[in-house]
Image (cartoon, grey):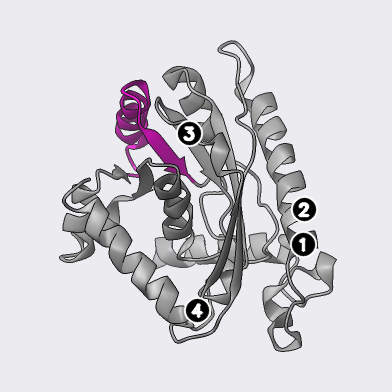
Amino acid sequence: MEPVYTPVIGLARALFAAQGLKITMSGVEHVPSHGGAVMAINHTGYFDFTYAGLVGVKAGRYVRFMAKKSIWSNPVAGPLMKGMKHIPVDREAGLGSFDAARDALRSGEIIGVFPEATISRSFELKAFKSGTVRLAQEGGVPILPVTIWGSQRVWTKGQPRKMGRHGIPLLITVGAPIEVGADEKPGLATIRVRAAMEAQLRADQDRYPAWPAAERHLLPTRLGGTAPTPQEADAMDVADRKSRRTS
């Protein structure tokens, strides 16, 4: 039990129960009972870190997430992030956060990362950053591929939150650990990890309950939805970054 993480988990579970969220977890047995691992998670909604964290809890582990440093400046969220031992990421000085995550892995922690870096507006997998693989290599640990499907229906970029009782189904799957050789080229290993997560995500999508017609805007075009295509979504992300630099 941890003085901050444990009660936060309790609050999250109470919220999910109040929402009637129908969570189905698969592959929890792949989470190691001890020792470090990098949990690589796809990213379609703002609550993905809480959902992925539940996987660790069910396996008897706490997941330490890497998240943008600005959250630590929030008077409410900041102390909670520190208390749960998450790792702040400074995009201007990323080496420090990488070293902190590597050291945590070597000490036996599970570190949660989002290889896509940002929420996917197309709800397809974006290109992966190589940091996930490099962390696993330097930490000497496996990668746990975790896919979440349905979280964009609760809250995602550019859409209103659904905090009331909605009964949305949510699938969370943990695949078999992926070992990365110390001498394996990070770029090639990243392609391998992404391919495994792509296959896993598509399997989740195939078994997901019928998608509501009113929410086709939250479904990839490949599946008959009207979400932005991956190319359109990438262009929107580029525009956002330019806007932030000039504001």
Mark 2 to mark 3 CA distance (whole Å): 22 Å
Under circle 2, the secondary element is helix
Of the two numbered discs 3 and 1 on the same chain, state the one appearing first in sequence.
Answer: 3
What range of the chain is rendered magenta? Answer: 89-113
| Residue 20 image label | 4
Answer with the quarter of the image where residue 167 lies.
bottom right
Under circle 4, the secondary element is loop
Q: Nearer the viewer, residue 78 or 240?
A: 78
Which residue has dot 2 on it?
203
Which residue has dot 1 on it?
207
Q: Any magenta on residue 99? A: yes
Q: Name the image quarter holding the C terminus.
A: bottom left
Which residue has dot 3 on it?
38
Answer with the quarter of the image where residue 49 lies.
bottom left
Few, some or many C-alpha atoms within 10 Å of disc 2 (few <14, some 14-19, many ≥20)?
A: few
Of the two numbered discs 2 and 3 on the same chain, state the one appearing first in sequence.
Answer: 3
Q: Nearer the viewer, residue 155 or 245?
A: 155
The single residue placed furthest to the top in the displayed view is 183
Identify residue type, mark 3: Val
Residue 240 locus on image (x, y percent): 51, 66
Tell which tag, 2 or 3, sits nearer the viewer: 2
Tell which tag, 4 or 2, sits nearer the viewer: 4
At horizontal 40% and vertical 35% (from top left) the residue drawn is 110
Of the two numbered discs 4 and 1 on the same chain, state the one appearing first in sequence.
Answer: 4
Identify residue type, mark 1: Arg
Mark 4 to mark 1 CA distance (whole Å): 20 Å
Few, some or many C-alpha atoms within 10 Å of disc 3 (few <14, some 14-19, many ≥20)?
A: many
Mark 3 to mark 4 CA distance (whole Å): 30 Å
